[in-house]
Image (spheres, helix red, strand yellow):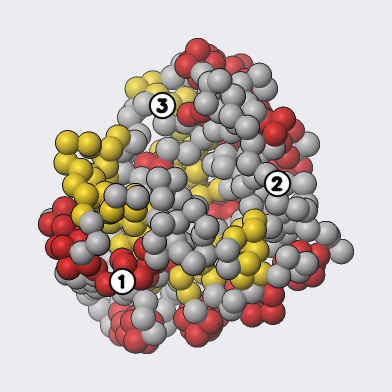
């Protein structure tokens, strides 16, 4: 049975601001538990967010047996188990390994792969081939075991949803061709149709590891400027002569999560069908009954759940009686407290774990977010218990951060916070709710 590794201490910071790799990456996994104030935490990587119903059952069993019974979705479509006993690691690893959720002990934290959640449901199924191929290649590469738990692959089916997340290596389907993006660069390589796209992604990641050897960078954006500028050329040489020179193609700046509701509907006849339904999860937190209902719904139809990078779940169909059956399933999920349409006051509201789960948090931001929930706003809002802003979204959002002086509210566009618009609200829940609502509008 696999044994759990102790949580590592925070790494010292180099003069360039990047933790040296010799200090290790403390990002949690299944074998390396993180010690939080509410017990140990395990992060289970779910490449592409894809779970079978049986694997979902195994995660629920693990949460009930070892933790607090709840399952928390992350901004990379992974699952966190909280409230774990510090000695449960070996048994937890054994349970997840038996369910196919831990194919390689050496690579379990390197399996960070997000994928377009609706891929193949309204178009080409190529992403599923990419996903299984890339995961297999990562787990089979001795070099890839050195990837940080923060390094991210993205597989985009052409709609631009996960391309907007600024992953370290992104594959984009464009008709018969494949585009390869490194980091958040506005240039892409074009690969020929016959290319092995997953292998190109792995070679790009291995080229990053060679470039990062002396800098201590965990992600492409952490590389020194000169190294980051040279990296595309290193990737092109690693992938081979089939790669074309880079072409200008800015990545989308606004991630597009699947809208809650039915997808793939055809309206005209009695044979109308819905190929999927999508729900969002308030604050990414699922209690056992909600998780069980999602799993039972998945088992009844397509047998699969897809966890999204926006803390939601897509359930592929087809739904046998078309729109009526999809609507019935959505009504049941809505009654269980999940977000099934754009009118929910929880739409676009996110928060870190906050107190009491995190010792660094200055407030119970989840309770505060719930108290401030009102009509859905134009912009999403994310509440952070401290300046680290763990799990914050990408694109444009309203940033609420607890500081010693109160709650700072600012408008974030991309990676840039807009200080001139920042306001601070002190110890007044009603004023805080009003300020957040005004900022979102």
Viewer-side residue, 187 vs 244: 187
The correct choice, above or below, for 172 with respect to 304 in the image is: above
Q: Tell me how far mark 3 sits from mark 2, CA to CA.
A: 32 Å
Which residue lies under the disc numbered 3?
185
Q: Does the rendering let one see residue 208?
A: no
| Residue 133 coordinates in the image, percent (x, y) | 65, 46
Q: Earlier in the sequence, mark 3 or mark 2?
A: 2
Q: Are marks 3 and 1 in contact (CB under 8 Å)?
A: no
| Residue 308 coordinates in the image, percent (x, y) | 45, 59
Q: Are marks 3 and 2 in contact (CB under 8 Å)?
A: no
Q: Does the rendering let one see residue 10?
A: yes
Which disc, if any, is residue 166?
Answer: none
Of marks 3 and 1, the one in the foreground: 1
- Neighbours of disc 3 within 10 Å: few (<14), some (14-19), many (20+): some
Which residue lies under the disc numbered 2?
8
- Left of 41 or right of it: where is 76? left
- Neighbours of disc 1 within 10 Å: few (<14), some (14-19), many (20+): some
Q: Residue at x 35, y 70 (%)?
A: 367
User: Could you tell me which secondary element the residue under label 1 belongs to?
Assistant: helix
| Residue 214 coordinates in the image, percent (x, y) | 66, 19
Q: Residue at x 42, y 82 (%)?
A: 320
Which residue lies under the disc numbered 1?
370
Q: Earlier in the sequence, mark 3 or mark 1?
A: 3
- Left of 49 or right of it: where is 5? right
Q: Are marks 2 and 1 in contact (CB under 8 Å)?
A: no
The correct choice, above or below, for 20 with respect to 43 in the image is: above
- Left of 156 or right of it: where is 394? left
Viewer-side residue, 197 vs 104: 104
Q: Earlier in the sequence, mark 2 or mark 1?
A: 2
Q: Tell me how far mark 3 sits from mark 1, CA to CA.
A: 37 Å
Quadrant where the image shows the N terminus:
bottom right
């Amino acid at each position: 049975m696999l044994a759990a590794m102790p949580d590592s201490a925070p790494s010292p910071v180099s003069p360039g601001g990047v933790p040296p790799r010799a200090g290790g990456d403390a990002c949690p996994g299944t074998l390396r538990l993180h010690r939080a104030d509410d017990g140990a935490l395990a992060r289970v990587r779910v490449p592409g967010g894809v779970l079978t119903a049986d694997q979902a059952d195994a995660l629920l069993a693990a949460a009930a047996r070892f933790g607090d019974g709840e399952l928390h979705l992350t901004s990379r479509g992974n699952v966190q188990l909280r409230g774990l006993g510090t000695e449960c690691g070996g048994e937890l690893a054994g349970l997840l390994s038996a369910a196919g959720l831990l194919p390689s002990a050496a690579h379990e934290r390197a399996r960070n792969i997000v994928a377009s959640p609706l891929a193949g449901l309204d178009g080409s199924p190529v992403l599923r081939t990419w996903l299984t191929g890339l995961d297999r290649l990562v787990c089979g590469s001795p070099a890839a075991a050195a990837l940080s738990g923060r390094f991210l692959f993205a597989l985009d089916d052409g709609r631009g949803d996960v391309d907007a997340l600024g992953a370290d290596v992104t594959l984009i389907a464009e008709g018969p061709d494949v585009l390869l993006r490194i980091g958040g660069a506005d240039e892409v390589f074009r690969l020929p149709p016959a290319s092995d796209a997953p292998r190109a992604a792995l070679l790009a990641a291995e080229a990053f590891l060679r470039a990062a050897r002396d800098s201590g960078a965990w992600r492409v954006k952490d590389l020194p400027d000169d190294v980051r500028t040279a990296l595309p050329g290193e990737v092109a040489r690693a992938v081979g002569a089939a790669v074309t020179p880079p072409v200008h193609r800015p990545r989308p700046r606004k991630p597009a999560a699947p809208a809650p509701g039915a997808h793939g509907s055809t309206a005209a006849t009695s044979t109308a069908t819905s190929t999927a339904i999508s729900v969002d999860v308030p604050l990414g937190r699922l209690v056992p009954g909600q998780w069980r209902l999602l799993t039972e719904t998945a088992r009844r139809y397509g047998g699969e759940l897809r966890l999204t990078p926006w803390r939601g779940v897509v359930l592929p169909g087809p739904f046998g009686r078309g729109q009526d059956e999809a609507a019935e399933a959505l009504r049941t999920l809505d009654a269980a407290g999940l977000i099934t349409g754009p009118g929910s006051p929880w739409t676009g509201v996110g928060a870190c774990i906050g107190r009491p789960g995190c010792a660094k948090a200055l407030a119970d931001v989840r309770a505060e977010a719930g108290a401030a929930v009102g009509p859905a706003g134009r912009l999403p809002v994310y509440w952070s218990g401290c300046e680290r802003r763990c799990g914050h979204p990408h694109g444009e959002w309203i940033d609420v951060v607890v500081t010693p002086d109160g709650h700072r509210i600012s408008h974030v566009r991309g990676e840039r916070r807009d200080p001139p618009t920042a306001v601070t609200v002190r110890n007044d829940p009603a004023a805080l709710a009003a300020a957040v609502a005004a900022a979102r509008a």
